[in-house]
Image (tube, rainbow, N blue to C red):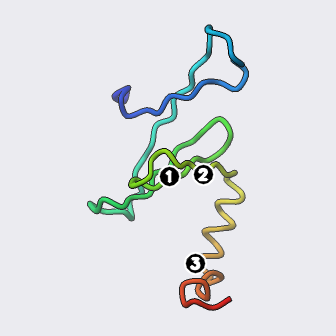
């Protein structure tokens, strides 16, 4: 079992405002492409889909589905976003 401190705990959306809440933990994993640098991409499986965050801003979390993430990665590999980096529209 992983160290519990490596998990991010979230209150279940079904718990409402009651004191007897269900908390769900997601374990963040650093991308193998991040190396030892401080600016790492973290990924976790979340009950809502795939959670992504950048290590420098851990409180900002993007939630997406596996299908949308696959399409994004496929597009990036195919160069669909190259014009954005070059400053084009």
Q: Which residue is mark 1?
A: 53
Q: Which marked residue is nearer to the observer: mark 2 or mark 3?
A: 2
Label 3 to label 1, Cα distance in Å?
20 Å
Disc on the earlier residue, 2 or 3? 2
The residue singled out by tag 3 in the image is 77
Residue 54 falls left or right of residue 50: left
Q: How many marks?
A: 3
Task: Name the outermost residue toward the front.
Answer: 17
- The residue lying at 71 percent from left, 59 percent from top is 68
Spatial separation of the CA atoms under disc 1 and disc 2: 6 Å
Up/down of 81 relative to 86, above or below: above
Classify residue 83 by image quadrant.
bottom right
> Camera-side residue: 16 or 40?
16
Dot 1 and dot 2 residues touching (CB under 8 Å): yes
Residue 2 at x, y percent in the picture: 36, 30
- Image quarter where the C terminus lies is bottom right
Kindly state the secondary structure of the residue where label 3 is placed: helix
Residue sitting at the far top:
20
């Amino acid at each position: 079992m992983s160290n519990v401190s490596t998990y991010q705990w979230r209150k279940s959306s079904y718990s409402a405002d009651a004191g007897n809440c269900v908390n769900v933990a997601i374990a963040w994993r650093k991308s193998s492409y991040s190396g030892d640098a401080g600016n790492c991409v973290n990924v976790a499986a979340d009950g809502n889909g795939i959670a992504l965050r950048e290590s420098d801003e851990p409180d900002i979390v993007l939630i997406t589905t596996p299908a949308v993430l696959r399409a994004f990665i496929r597009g990036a590999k195919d160069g669909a976003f190259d014009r954005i980096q070059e400053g084009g529209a």
